[in-house]
């Protein structure tokens, strides 16, 4: 006669755990689908920050090796998305000359409407900057060539809200040269943008 092992009923605790895991899995999948659909409906373009314009307001250095300067930088924040406002936060840039940070540009949290852009004028005045021999040679050469170069580095964190489902976040970074003519203080335009538009 065949012998059969005794049957063991599954513990109610195991059944409950399995049901809860199943519900969580379905919720995660469903939530992911909703976020994806919302993202595709909004279809956001990456927000862009760029240098719209600049001007060398003031530049002075002496034989002792001290430089003073004031620069106006116009930053543009763009939101090309037609279906959502963009929020920019933690916006900060460093203005650098020959590897030395001479000023900071900061902006409080701000919002850019759908398919709009905003401009921010920064008047950056440095404290007297002591120049080492390398920097003095660099500025002498810049005056002779009539081109002086500063570096602008930094960025902002941007995000859109995808309806009630959450937000889409992006990092906007700038790293570029700002070139000016000391003879007339004019800005030599060159592309300076955080990202290519799609």
Image (cartoon, rainbow, N blue to C red):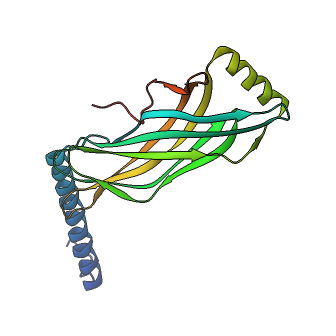
**Above or below, comparing residue 14 to residue 103 in the picture:** below
Residue at x-position 24% and y-position 41%: 80
Residue 21 relative to residue 156: left or right = left
**How far across and down, in percent of the image, does residue 30 sit?**
17, 60
What is the residue that sits farthest to the bottom in this orientation?
12
Please indicate, yes or no, whether residue 140 appears anywhere in the rendered image: yes
* Front position in the image: 57 or 121: 57
**Above or below, comparing residue 57 to residue 120 in the picture:** above
Residue at x-position 48% and y-position 34%: 54
* Front position in the image: 133 or 128: 128
**How far across and down, in percent of the image, does residue 190 sit?**
46, 23
Q: Quadrant of the C terminus?
A: top left
Residue at x-position 24% and y-position 62%: 28
Residue 158 relative to residue 85: left or right = right
Residue at x-position 45% and y-position 24%: 189
**How far across and down, in percent of the image, does residue 25 sit?**
24, 64
Residue 160 placement: quadrant: bottom left
Q: How many marks?
A: 0
**Above or below, comparing residue 101 to residue 112 in the picture:** above
**How far across and down, in percent of the image, does residue 109 sit?**
40, 59
Please indicate, yes or no, whether residue 4 appears anywhere in the rendered image: no
């Amino acid at each position: 006669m065949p012998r059969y092992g005794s049957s063991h009923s599954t513990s109610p605790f195991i059944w409950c755990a399995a049901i809860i895991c199943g519900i969580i899995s379905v919720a995660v999948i469903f939530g992911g689908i909703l976020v994806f659909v919302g993202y595709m409906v909004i279809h956001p373009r990456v927000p862009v920050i760029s240098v719209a314009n600049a001007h060398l307001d003031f530049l002075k250095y002496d034989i002792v090796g001290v430089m003073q300067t004031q620069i106006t930088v116009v930053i543009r924040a763009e939101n090309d998305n037609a279906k959502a406002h963009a929020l920019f936060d933690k916006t900060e840039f460093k203005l650098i000359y020959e590897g030395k940070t001479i000023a900071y540009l900061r902006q409080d949290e701000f919002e850019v409407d759908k398919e709009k852009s905003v401009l921010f004028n920064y008047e950056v005045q440095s404290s007297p900057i002591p120049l080492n021999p390398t920097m003095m040679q660099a500025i002498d050469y810049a005056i002779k060539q009539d081109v002086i170069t500063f570096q602008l580095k930094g960025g902002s964190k941007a995000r859109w809200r995808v309806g009630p489902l959450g937000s889409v976040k992006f990092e906007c970074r700038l790293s570029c040269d700002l070139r000016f003519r000391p003879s007339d203080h004019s800005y030599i335009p060159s592309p300076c943008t955080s990202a290519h538009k799609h």
